Amino acid sequence: MSEQDTRQQIALIGAGPSGLAAARNLQKAGLPFQGFEAYSDVGGLWNIANPRSTVYESAHLISSKRMTEFSEFPMDDSVADYPSHKELQRYFAAFADKFGLRQHYRFSTRVQRVEPVGNGPAPLWRVSWLDAAGGEHSAEFKAVVIANGTLAEPNMPRFEGNFTGELHHTSAYKSAEMFKDKRVLIIGAGNSGCDIAVDAVHYAKSVDISVRRGYYFVPKYVFGKPADTIGGKITLPPWLKQRIDSRILQWFTGDPVRFGFPKPEYRMYESHPVVNSLILHHIGHGDVKVRPDIARFEGQTVHFKDGSSRDYDLVLAATGYQLHYPFISRELLNWQGMAPQLYLNIFAPRFTNLAVIGMVEASGLGWQGRYEQAELVARFLKAQASEPARAAGFAAKLTGPAPDLSGGYRYLKLERMAYYVNKDVYRRTVRAEAAALAGA
C-alpha cells in the first residue's frame, strides 16, 4: 500500500457493528477505504474470542432482533427474539461475507495514532499502526472514520478503603463459574449488573446488589411479544408518555421500591431502562438482596451508606464503560466534559473529513441507527467531490448550533448518558440530512 494510493482512501477504524455499517456505506457510495481491526475477525465486542470483548457466556441482546438488525440484512426467522452473542457473531460474519467487506480490512492491526497533516478543515490524516508481528507502519489518508465502539474500556470507580477479597469489573466476567460457593456483591443495577446477578444465583453462596439510584424495569415480553415491538404508533408529548408508560409498567413489574430499590428521582426515559424479566423475580424469591450505595471497604467487609455492613468473597463492579479513543487527541474530537461534542454525535466541528460512528445511545436505536449515521457520513464525503455546494452547505452546520436531539426529555447528567439522544428525533434528523446530501 503506497502513500500515493492511501491519499485517495478513507481510513476506517473498527470492524464491529458500527465499523461494518461504515464499511458497507462507504462501499455503496463507491468511496475507496482501508479498514483497520485490532482483532483477527469481525464482530467487535460480540465476538467473545476477541480479547477486548466484554460479553459473557450468557450475554443476549436486550433489544429484540427486529428492532436491532440492519434493515438490508434481516436476521433469519430461526434466530431467537433476543439473540445470544453466538448468534450475533454469526450474523456479523454473514453480513461481512454477503457484501465482501473483509477484503477491505487489515486484521490483527492496531491503530496507534491518528493526527492531521497540515491545517485547515480537510487536512490529510497520518495513521500509524502496528501489524500482527509488531511492525510499525504509517500512511496518509484523505479522511478518517472512527468506529471502534463504546463498550470496551472499563469505568472502574475508586472506593474508599481496601477490599482484600476478589475485586473485578464486569469486563472480566465470562462465566458464572467464578461465583461458585462465594458471597458475591454486584455494584450497579444496570442491564449488565442485573443479567450477571441472575447468573450468579445459580452458583453463589449469596448474591447482593448495591445500588445508588432507582431504576425502571422493563420486562422482555409483554402479551407474549418482545416489549420493544409493542406500541410506538401514536406519538405522545414526553410528559404524557412518561406518565402513561410508567403506570403501565407498574402493572407488569410492580413497584421496584417494594423490593428495596430507591424510588427513581427522575422520570421514565430520562435514563436507560433495565430490560430484564428475571431480576425482580429472584429478588422477590430472596435469591438476591438489594443493598445501598457503598461507603467504604475494610478487608473483606463492605460498609454501606445506611450504616450496615457485610462480608464478601467477591465484588464485581457493573459500573459501565468509558469512551475510549486513545489514538487521537481529545482536542481534535472537541472533547468537553464527559464526551466529545460532535455535530449529530458524528462530526468533529473543526474538520470536514473526520467522523465517529457509534458514539450514540438511545433506547431502541439499534444497529440501523448506526447504519444511518454511516450513510450520512458516506454521502457527505462523496458530496465533497461530486456536489461541493451541497457539501459546503452541510459543512457550515458542523460548528453549530447543534439541533436539539433530546425529544423533550431531560436526560440524567451521567457519563453514560452524555451522548444519549431520542431515537425518533435522532433518526429523523440524520435521515433528512442524508437525503438532502443525496439531492432527494
Image (cartoon, rainbow, N blue to C red):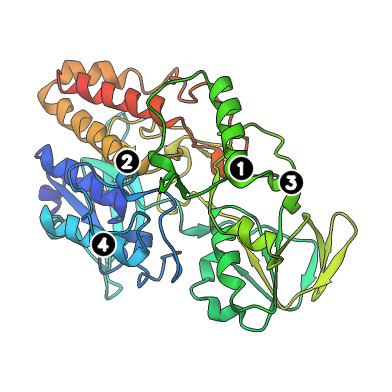
Indicate the secondary structure of the residue bearing disc 2.
Answer: helix
Disc 1/disc 2 C-alpha distance (Å): 25 Å
Farthest front residue in view: 223
Which residue is tagged 4?
Answer: 42
Answer with mark 2 or mark 4, whichever residue precedes in sequence.
4
Left or right for 363, reference 320:
left
Q: Measured along the vertical axis of the image, is residue 292 above or below residue 398?
A: below
Indicate the secondary structure of the residue bearing disc 3.
Answer: helix
How crowded is the residue under tag 2: few (<14 C-alpha within 10 Å), some, or many (20+)? Answer: many
Q: Amino acid at mark 1?
A: Tyr
Q: Amino acid at mark 2?
A: Arg
Residue 350 visible (yes or no): yes
Which residue is tagged 3?
Answer: 257
Which residue is tagged 1?
Answer: 216
Residue drawn at x 39%, y 52% as measured from the top left: 149
How crowded is the residue under tag 3: few (<14 C-alpha within 10 Å), some, or many (20+)? Answer: few
Residue 370 is tagged as: 2
Residue drawn at x 50%, y 76% as measured from the top left: 175
